[in-house]
């Protein structure tokens, strides 16, 4: 979701989130949601929330922090009911306030509606203007979306969703609930993931299949691009389609965002990453003594790279597991400190050796530059970098946390200049065709805008103007 006020301040605010929902009378839905959100923690670490309906009352707990710090046995026990939705939020500057924590809940004439959103509504500013003087408590596009649904024609929430959804432009994977029903819907491009599972005869929806596995649910299928689903007393039903599906699934989910044990479009993320490493080994082979990953995001790809060249794979950098993702720190100097305390190299293993370091992506170059620095201090003989995605040059407007254009190291620098800046002996990126081959998806069914600049959904000109004017 995006932050409307920040947009007005002409800043680009970006995040990607994890969503979950379940309809299961007789089950402890709050605890199930807790465990699902815990397994989706990688998609958002800023805040967490759960809303539960018992058919009459909707109660919620939402707070800043990780899932394990927001919830405990005590407060989860208070969330009694049979429908639950949950959310993990991830954002950078501006929107880190309590009011922006999801699920967003509105009450209107005795009716209640709650929604958790992963994505980014690119025309939120226009939609927010159409809401006029509607009272709002947050600055997020999700609240705009919920009010737009509430104001749409129809007596039932299902009718309102069907009538409002065609107005939303951009990426949205939404799990919502009323007092008596669970809803799930996804933008017609299917940019962000959303999957359906079955648990003891009931239904659950989640951003990733790893969440379904964690709670013991069986993955059935994805929510189709553009599909609107309702689960209620009469069971599961497809309400219809927002628009004709035109699949453009985010390629970066395979590269970095998702957990390796999740499956999207029949492809296990770990295997896509392993293949990316294998293909990169063909595109840019190297003679070396050891292949290592930047843990954990580069691990699957490093295994594939090492296997393809017959070079041993080993651990070189030990990650401190109790530090958050360095990328989410807002200020550059904090980010730099973060990298230093995040990875510790094992000097004894690498001294005098030719090492290949594999990572999934380079964004600003901060992480890699610091890693190369600490490895050089260990007396490494050669350091070769292999990146299993193409250079990132374009901002994402569909719900991924990317900085503005000029902060990408690949903008304004050739690969050889980046290599020099980072201080490596060699540097190679995987080609876009290589990455698409690894994903085993049809090129036309993918969004690769961050690599190619080919945006599948028209970005609202004001939005674009705001972002580009302020940042480029
Ligand atoms: P940087 O230091 O800015 O070059 O960041 C590169 C590192 O950030 C890589 O190791 C990636 O695994 C990771 N990364 C890439 N995209 C994102 C993202 N959207 N959010 C958080 N981390 C990311």
Image: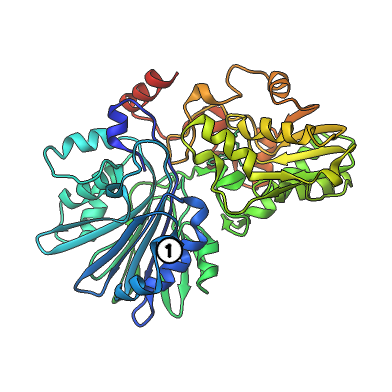
Q: Is residue 165 left or right of residue 48?
A: left
Q: Give 422 or 36, whichever is nearer the viewer.
A: 422
Task: Give coordinates of residue 265: x percent, y percent.
Answer: 56, 54
Instruction: In the rendered view, tell whether residue 431 sits above or below residue 416.
Output: below
Instruction: In the rendered view, tell whether residue 429 sits above or below residue 96.
Output: above
Confirm whether residue 228 shows in the render.
Answer: no
Task: Give coordinates of residue 101: x percent, y percent.
Answer: 32, 51
Which image quadrant is residue 288 in?
top right
Question: What residue is at 78 percent from the left and 33 percent from the top?
Answer: 377
Question: What residue is at 31 percent from the left and 63 percent from the top?
Answer: 61
Which image quadrant is residue 26 in?
bottom left
Q: Is residue 461 left or right of residue 164?
A: right
Question: What residue is at 38 percent from the left and 25 percent from the top?
Answer: 467
Residue picked out by circle 1 = 205
Question: What residue is at 13 percent from the left and 43 percent from the top?
Answer: 134
Confirm whether residue 74 shows in the render.
Answer: yes
Q: Give 379 or 328, whichever is nearer the viewer.
A: 379
Indicate how the structure is coloured in the image: rainbow
Q: Dot 1, how many residues are within 10 Å of its Cα: few (below 14), some (14-19), or many (20+)?
A: many
| Tag 1 secondary structure | strand
Image quarter for ligand 1 equals: top right
Task: Give coordinates of residue 434: x percent, y percent.
Answer: 70, 38
Task: Give coordinates of residue 98: x percent, y percent.
Answer: 30, 49
Q: How many marks?
A: 1
């Amino acid at each position: 979701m995006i932050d409307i006020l920040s947009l007005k301040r002409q800043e680009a605010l970006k995040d990607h989130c994890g969503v979950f929902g379940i309809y299961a009378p007789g089950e402890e839905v709050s605890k199930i949601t807790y465990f699902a959100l815990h397994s989706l923690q990688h998609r958002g670490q800023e805040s967490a929330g759960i809303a539960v309906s018992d058919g009459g009352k909707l109660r919620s707990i939402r707070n800043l922090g990780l899932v394990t710090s927001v919830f405990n046995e005590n407060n989860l026990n208070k969330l009694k009911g049979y429908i639950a939705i949950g959310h993990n939020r991830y954002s950078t500057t501006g929107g880190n306030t309590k009011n922006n924590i999801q699920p967003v809940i509105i009450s209107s004439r005795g009716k209640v509606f709650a929604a958790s959103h992963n994505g980014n509504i690119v025309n939120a500013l226009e939609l927010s203007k159409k809401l006029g003087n509607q009272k709002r408590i947050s600055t997020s596009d999700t609240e705009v979306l919920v009010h737009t649904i509430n104001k749409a024609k129809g007596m039932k929430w299902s009718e309102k969703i069907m009538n409002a959804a065609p107005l939303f432009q951009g990426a949205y994977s939404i799990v919502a609930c009323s007092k008596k029903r669970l809803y799930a819907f996804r933008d017609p491009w299917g940019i962000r993931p959303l999957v359906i599972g079955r648990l003891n005869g009931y239904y659950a929806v989640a951003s990733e299949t790893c969440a379904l596995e964690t709670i013991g649910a069986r993955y059935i299928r994805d929510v189709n691009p553009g599909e609107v689903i309702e689960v209620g007393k009469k069971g599961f039903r497809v309400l219809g389609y927002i628009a004709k599906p035109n699949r453009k699934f985010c390629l970066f989910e395979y590269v970095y965002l998702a957990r390796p044990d999740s499956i999207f479009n029949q492809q296990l993320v770990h295997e896509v990453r392993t293949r990316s490493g294998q293909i990169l080994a063909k595109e840019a082979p190297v003679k070396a003594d050891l292949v290592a990953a930047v843990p954990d995001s580069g691990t699957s790809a490093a295994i594939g790279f090492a296997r393809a060249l017959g070079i041993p794979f080993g651990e070189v950098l030990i990650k401190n597991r109790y530090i958050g993702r360095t990328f989410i720190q807002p200020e550059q100097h904090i980010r730099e400190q973060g990298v230093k305390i995040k990875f510790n190299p094992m000097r004894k293993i690498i001294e005098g050796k030719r090492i290949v370091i594999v990572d999934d992506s380079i964004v600003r170059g901060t992480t890699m530059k610091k890693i190369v620095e600490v490895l050089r201090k260990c007396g490494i003989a050669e350091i070769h970098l292999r990146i299993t995605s193409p250079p990132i040059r374009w901002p994402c407007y569909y719900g991924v946390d990317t900085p503005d254009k000029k902060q990408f190291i690949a903008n304004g620098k050739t690969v050889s200049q980046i290599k020099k800046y980072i201080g490596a002996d060699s540097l190679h990126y995987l080609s876009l065709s290589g990455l698409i081959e690894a994903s085993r998806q049809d090129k036309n069914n993918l969004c690769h805008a961050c690599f190619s600049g080919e945006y599948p959904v028209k970005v609202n000109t004001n939005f674009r103007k705001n972002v580009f004017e302020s940042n480029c």
